[in-house]
Image (cartoon, coloured by chain):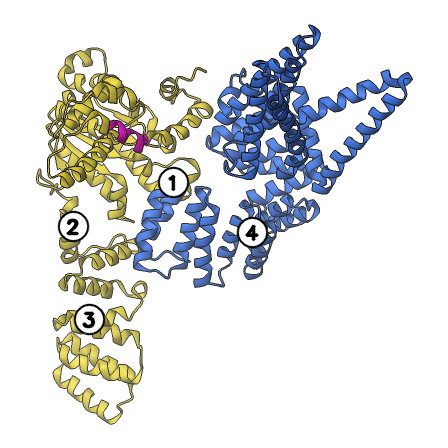
Chain colours: A blue, B yellow
Amino acid sequence: MQPNNVNISRAELLLEQGRISDAVKELKSALQQDPDNAYVYALYARCHYAKGEYSEGLNKIQQAISLEPDEAYYFYLRGFAYYHLNQLAMATTELNKAISLYPYHAEYFGLYAFVLLDDRKYELALAKANEGLELDPENVTSLNARARALNKLKRTDEAVETMQDALSNAPESDFTHVTIGFNHLERGKHKEAQQHFREALRLSPNLHSAKEGLKEALKANFPPYRFLLQLGFWLAEKGQGFRIGFSIGLYILFRFVTSMASSMPGIRWILVPFIVLYLLYVSFSWIGSSVANFILLFHKDGKYILNNWERYTAIAIVCLLLSGITLGSVAYINNLDINLTLAGVILATMCMPVSRFEDGDTMTLRSVKAIFTSALILTGITAVALSLLSTTGAAAGIVTGAYFVGLIIYTWTSGGWN
Amino acid sequence: MKEMIQNLVDALNLSPDNVPLRLQVAHLMMNEKMYAEAVEQLSEVLKRSYGHTTAQQQLAECFYYLGKYSAAIITYEQLEFEQLPVQSAAFFIRSLIKEHSIEQAMELYRQLLVHHPQFADEEIDKVLRLGTSTEMDDEFPFDDSDYFLEKPTTKFSDVGGMKNVKNEISLKIIQPLKNPDLYKAFGKKAGGGILLYGPPGCGKTFIAKATAGEIDAKFISIGLHDILDMWIGNSEKNLHQVFEVARANKPCVLFFDEVDALGSSRADLKQSAMRHVINQFLAELDGVDADNEGILILAATNAPWSVDGAFRRPGRFDRIIFVAPPDEEARVDILQQLLKEKPVAEIDVKKIAAQSDGYSGADLTALIDIAVEDKLAHSIETGELQPITTKDLLRALKVHKPTTQEWFSSARNYALYANESGLYDEILKYLKIKR
């Protein structure tokens, strides 16, 4: 593990300084001199991690392990990559190996606790974080994991105390501020969350998690989004099965209420608000984020935090919504051509597929999801164009029909894609 | 003595397996410079006690004295370099030098210096320490012929664009030298440092050189990265020497490229060895032990956020200047310069400049290179010289995207979220972000 040549010491220094490409150059020359140096491969893996290239990092750390299969640190590094690639079971295996080889490193336990947190095993995560803290009471990772776990377990006071500990140990830790930010956000305290995310960004302006956190916290200024966010946190804790059950359950309830409303006109006035609420909930769960993004465009910090995909999707959705509602209602009220009303409905409903492009920067644009969504939007645009040109005949009908069928398939399946 | 050795050899003949005695004999022989005989004895030791390290070390040393350098190298190579006593390590390095394996010698010498920073050996230093020798501390052995001291002829007029930067440098560096009385009247001292920052390839080094040319001063350019490497473990001493050379060659512009590699901030400071270097650098900047009058210190960095905050205190790098990518006018200038001696047809430089927003000087050079390569291939095919056209450059624009974008995406975050003292206002201005 000890560096034994100048290239390695240089690479370590450069990696610390964040000059990753320079560090890689040094590592390449180190490997030329000593192609069997496991430690060099481990440093190389860390360089990849620093650039977010976890799969490439895995290849490198694999080489380190094959050269030195009894070094705990390399297994930890492999676990680290799996954790970031969201392969939690693999990460667990690696960390178990690392800990069995060297059970005295708090960092290994801290990371293990984070893996368990992602797996929603909060009690176990707390136990692992505590084990880490027994080894090193000031270990930032374990302290953060403990605070996250306690917050999830609703042991708020202890969570706050742990967070204070973490901050007093490392007041300049961006990571700790992000953790505290998310804890506040989960508890609905978006203003406090904003403060901590801002602090994290001040310390590390390029920290992705802090930026995402601040974005969510700022969007939470908008009350309907705040509700959606809380609901999202609540559902996330319950697991995927519950989430699907929740949606289907709500839908069945909705069908039941609507059928009651139609069969018993006497109590319809009581049921209508429920129906409206449900429809608002459904539509908002599709476009709420984009609408909140749109509002952020007028916020002094918010406008810079959105990426281009989010910005343009937000603008497109608000335009579609406004033009759709205006066109549809004007045509309906004035008893104009039914096709115009339909065009309004199509425009408004196109928000749903368009909203998916909010994640454009992380989306694979050649995936089934992206292609189907784009095709649906194109069909929608064609249908609207045909209606506006008042084309009558089979073509308009078929396109409009295709759009609605596509939309129904889309609404029922795209949840699974996410 | 020789008699005693002979007696001991006789004794050894009676008890040939007495390894300690044989070693003792070999040692005495070496003292008497009887290297060939010592080799014999040591070989016997190694036959009986394979891998005996002391015997191997002594054997290698004998080989060295016998002029059998490759045999010495082979023997040393069987030993762990890090385990070698300093003297043996020095013999090893000398053997390598004799065999002209300079690279390997350099490598080992660096390793040796890591563990023994004070080590010095005249014979080795003469070959491995470029242009310097161990007498450095007492006098200044550098003269104009030394490898990093130069006298640039570039002037400000050779630098396209950058009006703002030129003005700042002029006010801070050039005018105090030209009008010392005026500055004295206002109680303003000449000197201090300027930190240039900005995306890579935008001419920071060039403007620094032009500054030296403008005031007819000597110019020392230090890639700190290289310096630190050249003397890993010995960088403090080296830094001092650089400043001393500058002081001996006044007026002198001392330019530190990539200064952030030296003064990394915050979390990066776990490297306590680096802390010493930073402190040494600060002491030199402040001129604690010496007078810095007449030395102008310029530094450049692509990562101003990594520069130690202490560097920015008054009297150190108190002027921090953003060197932006060239504006349209400057791009026209640069393109014209670059195309000057190339076979060109009529080229609409303005059009290219208008379409190359965000391109750095280095990017523009890359554009021309792409176009030239293209034309070369074409000329070879047709057997006729094909001049570069506007179209070729427009095509190159499509192939080569500005490299400054990546820098700005990072810098933007710093300017938005970590701009407490207004340090990055210039970046916000450039990106047209109003806060």
Task: Measure the C-alpha gap from mark 1 to mark 2.
Answer: 32 Å
- Under mark 4, the amino acid is Tyr
Are the residues flagged by discs 1 and 2 from a single subunit? no
Dot 2 crowding, Cα within 10 Å, few <14, some 14–19, many 20+:
few
Q: Amino acid at mark 2?
A: Thr
**Looking at this view, is A25 or A364 the one in front?**
A364
Chain letter of disc 1 in the image: A
Circle 3 or circle 1, nearest the eye: 1
Amino acid, disc 3: Ala
Foreground disc of the pair 1, 2: 1
Distance Cα–Cα, label 3 vs label 1: 40 Å
Q: Which mark identifies residue A17?
A: 1
**Chain where mark 4 sits:** A
The chain to which mark 2 is attached is B
Which residue has dot 4 on it? A108
Position of residue B364 measured from the top left corner of the image (x, y, whole percent): 24, 29
SS for callout 3: helix
Residue span colored magenta: B393-403
Q: Position of residue A269 (x, y in %)?
A: 85, 15
Residue A120: x and y in percent read: 67, 44
Q: Mark 3 = which residue?
A: B72
Q: Which amino acid type is marked by label 1? A: Gln
Residue identifier under label 2? B134
